[in-house]
């Protein structure tokens, strides 16, 4: 029998400890969980019942002991892709770095419209980047009034990380107007760029 | 100056502060009622908001909500708590008129922190088009913040949670799983890239959602907050005497929430909400336990659950998506009352 | 979800239309012209049908000598 001590732990720690311990047990082995509050006991026993097991509870000297026999493979092998489309997005190992708010050199207005089209097309691309980085004038694309803000928010909700250079926001005095993403610094940005397989610079 | 972490003032395990639905029902049972011909929506169907008719074309919505910190940053907390309190007005299809601050604050925490909370709240009320009238503050060990809100609505256009019709389609405007992710953040199991989206979602007003509902003459909706998607769906089903069928696979959720459940990171509120709904609910065998917990996750300032006429579904979803609710999804349908109020697969 | 796609005869027309429609306060997205509609590289405008006032849009674009073709596309 394996005993884990969840006394003094507040929810949801006792549940996490229980799940982890069950994962390490063999079938038919017994787990004992020690707790000191009724709420945790109720939640852990309910959790075990939901997993298809039959826990029993005892109390001794104001400590609760919950015993359960591990009856089946605990991990449900949850197939995240089965669930909703938000979790469904498999992201590819590449990053797109927007060094300005335009694409290419030459005409400014053409560059601006190309950048918008690029971002608006990202939601449909099969191999989506795992991160988008915005530097220098690229930060204009992530401000609250950016014409592509809704698309970027949608990409963020799909799990694509959006990093925005804090120095650049500060330089352009736009820190208060950030509409999406996280304010980042050169360390984080460099770390991201150096650890990825491919970077697309725009 | 190191930013003050509001979550350091919250000692309990972060389970949502709401009293369980069952306890609330017990406390409210057998209290004297105050029926009145001008009371258009009352405590029977909606416990934290009511509608009172003032004239033939004006009714006032009154609602309130407040709670301890749900995040570290005081300004964000102010924004989220305010958006949450304002949400009921929009869920009823109304417009925000005025708000009052409700504040509890410890003496030992720097006043700058309180200032930031209030700034967050006031800016959100301004964004909602409302007027901040003042408020009331008391001393308490654990900070709490929220609003008492007054809204306006035409008496014939009130959207309630008791008017669902069989054949209606169920639409949800924001993802669920915020409670789980907040719990995950508290124990260090989640990174910023998965936490930031839920903060943004909680700060987002349901204002445009309310406007779009009125445009399509929706009669029945509710907002998703502390009782989770299933808790609020049950209230709506009971209020309307219908059965709601919800397909768990179609319910949008925040990235990372399901992974956290897999680890066992399930807030206590999920179990409280399960106790509330389980007797009125049929869970199909195909429903995985982890998905079930997700549907029970308490939300703060969640989205709108809308009963939409089937002819308007596509247009409504398009408009909602365009208006900033990018994850709007059809999640089920309304049927004639069957054996149980909720049928979940 | 179905969207209307406005296709133009040149990128200059796309650019001009973008400015005109923005001036009218219409909400739209700039996207590359979908392959199935045209193989030319070009920029198109995508509008949600619920927000599309055909008369208004035609009127302002025609006034500015811009011809456009209207297509439909379903996005998942």
Image (spheres, grey):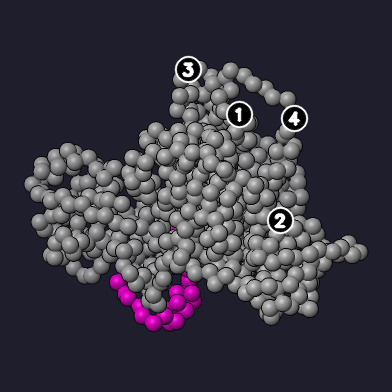
Q: Are marks 3 and 4 in contact (CB under 8 Å)?
A: no
Q: Are marks 2 and 1 in contact (CB under 8 Å)?
A: no
The residue tagged 3 is B56
Q: Are marks 3 and 1 in contact (CB under 8 Å)?
A: no
The residue tagged 1 is B42
Residues under labels 3 and 2: Cα distance? Answer: 46 Å
Q: Nearer the viewer, mark 2 or mark 4?
A: 4
Specify start and end residues of the magenta stretch as a single range: A180-202
Mark before the other along the chain sequence, 2 or 4: 2
Question: How many other residues sit within 10 Å of disc 1, few (<14), some (14-19) or many (≥20)?
Answer: some
Whether residue B67 sits left or right of residue A136 in the image: it is right
- Answer whether residue B9 is magenta in the image: no
The residue tagged 2 is B10
Residues under labels 3 and 4: Cα distance? Answer: 32 Å
Mark before the other along the chain sequence, 2 or 1: 2
Mark before the other along the chain sequence, 3 or 1: 1
Chain ID, mark 1: B
Are tags 1 and 4 found on a single chain? yes
SS class, disc 4: loop
Q: Nearer the viewer, mark 3 or mark 4?
A: 4
Are tags 3 and 4 found on a single chain? yes
- Vertical placement of B191 versus B210: above or below? below
The residue tagged 4 is B30
Residues under labels 2 and 4: Cα distance? Answer: 34 Å
Which residue is found at the position 58% from the left and 17% from the top?
Answer: B37
Whether residue B286 sits left or right of residue C24 in the image: it is right
Mark before the other along the chain sequence, 3 or 2: 2
Counting from the top left corner in percent of width and height, residue B206 is at: 47, 43
SS class, disc 1: loop
SS class, disc 2: loop
């Amino acid at each position: 029998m394996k005993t884990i001590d969840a006394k003094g732990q507040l929810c949801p720690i006792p549940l996490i400890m229980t799940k982890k311990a069950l994962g390490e047990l063999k079938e038919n082995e017994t787990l004992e969980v020690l707790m000191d509050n009724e709420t945790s006991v109720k939640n852990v026993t309910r959790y075990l019942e939901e997993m298809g097991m039959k826990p029993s509870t005892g109390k001794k000297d104001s400590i609760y002991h919950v015993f359960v026999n591990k009856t089946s493979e605990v991990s449900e092998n949850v197939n995240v892709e089965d669930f909703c489309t938000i979790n469904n997005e498999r992201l590819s190992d590449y990053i797109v770095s927007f060094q300005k708010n335009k694409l290419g050199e030459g005409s400014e207005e053409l560059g601006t419209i190309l950048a918008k089209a690029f971002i608006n097309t990202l939601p449909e691309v099969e191999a989506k980047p795992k991160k988008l980085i915005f530097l220098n004038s690229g930060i204009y694309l992530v401000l609250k009034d950016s014409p592509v803000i809704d698309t970027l928010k949608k990409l963020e909700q799909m799990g694509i990380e959006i990093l925005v250079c804090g120095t650049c926001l500060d330089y352009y005095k736009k820190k208060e107007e950030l509409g999406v993403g996280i304010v980042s610094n050169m360390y984080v940005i460099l770390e991201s760029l150096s650890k990825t397989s491919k970077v697309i610079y725009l | 100056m190191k930013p003050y972490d509001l979550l350091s003032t919250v000692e309990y395990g972060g389970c949502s502060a709401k009293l369980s639905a069952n306890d609330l029902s017990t406390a409210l049972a057998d209290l004297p009622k105050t029926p009145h011909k001008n009371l258009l929506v009352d405590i029977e169907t909606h416990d934290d908001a009511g509608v009172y008719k003032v004239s033939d074309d004006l009714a006032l919505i009154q609602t309130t909500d407040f709670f301890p910190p749900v995040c570290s940053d005081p300004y964000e907390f102010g924004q989220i708590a305010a958006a949450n309190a304002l949400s009921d007005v929009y869920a009823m299809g109304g417009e925000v008129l005025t708000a009052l601050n409700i504040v509890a604050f410890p003496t030992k925490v720097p006043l700058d922190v309180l200032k930031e909370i209030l700034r967050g709240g006031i800016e959100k009320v301004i964004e909602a088009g409302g007027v901040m009238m003042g408020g009331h503050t008391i001393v308490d060990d654990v900070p709490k913040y929220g609003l008492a809100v007054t809204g306006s609505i035409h008496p014939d256009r009130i959207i309630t949670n008791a008017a669902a019709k069989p054949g209606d389609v169920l639409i949800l405007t924001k993802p669920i799983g915020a409670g789980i992710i907040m719990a995950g953040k508290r124990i260090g199991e989640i990174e910023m890239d998965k936490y930031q989206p839920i903060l943004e979602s909680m700060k987002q007003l349901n204002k445009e959602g309310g406007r779009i509902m009125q445009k399509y003459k929706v009669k029945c909706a509710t907002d998703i907050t502390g009782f989770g998607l299933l808790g609020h769906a049950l209230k709506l089903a009971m209020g309307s005497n219908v059965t709601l069928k919800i397909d768990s696979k179609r319910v949008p959720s925040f990235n990372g929430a399901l992974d956290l459940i897999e680890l066992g990171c399930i807030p206590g509120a999920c179990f409280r909400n399960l106790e509330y709904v389980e007797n009125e609910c049929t869970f199909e065998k195909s429903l995985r336990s982890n998905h079930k917990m997700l549907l029970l996750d308490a939300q703060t300032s969640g989205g709108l659950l809308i009963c939409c006429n089937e002819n308007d579904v596509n247009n409504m979803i398009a408009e909602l998506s365009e208006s900033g609710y990018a994850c709007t999804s059809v999640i089920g349908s309304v049927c004639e009352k069957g054996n149980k109020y909720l049928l979940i697969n | 979800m179905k969207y209307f796609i406005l296709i133009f005869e040149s990128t200059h027309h796309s650019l001009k239309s973008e400015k005109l429609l923005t001036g009218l306060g219409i909400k739209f997205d700039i996207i590359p012209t979908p392959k199935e509609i045209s193989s030319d590289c070009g920029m198109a405008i995508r509008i949600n049908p619920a927000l599309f006032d055909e008369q208004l849009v035609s009127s302002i674009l025609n006034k500015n000598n811009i011809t456009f073709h209207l297509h439909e596309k379903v996005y998942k």
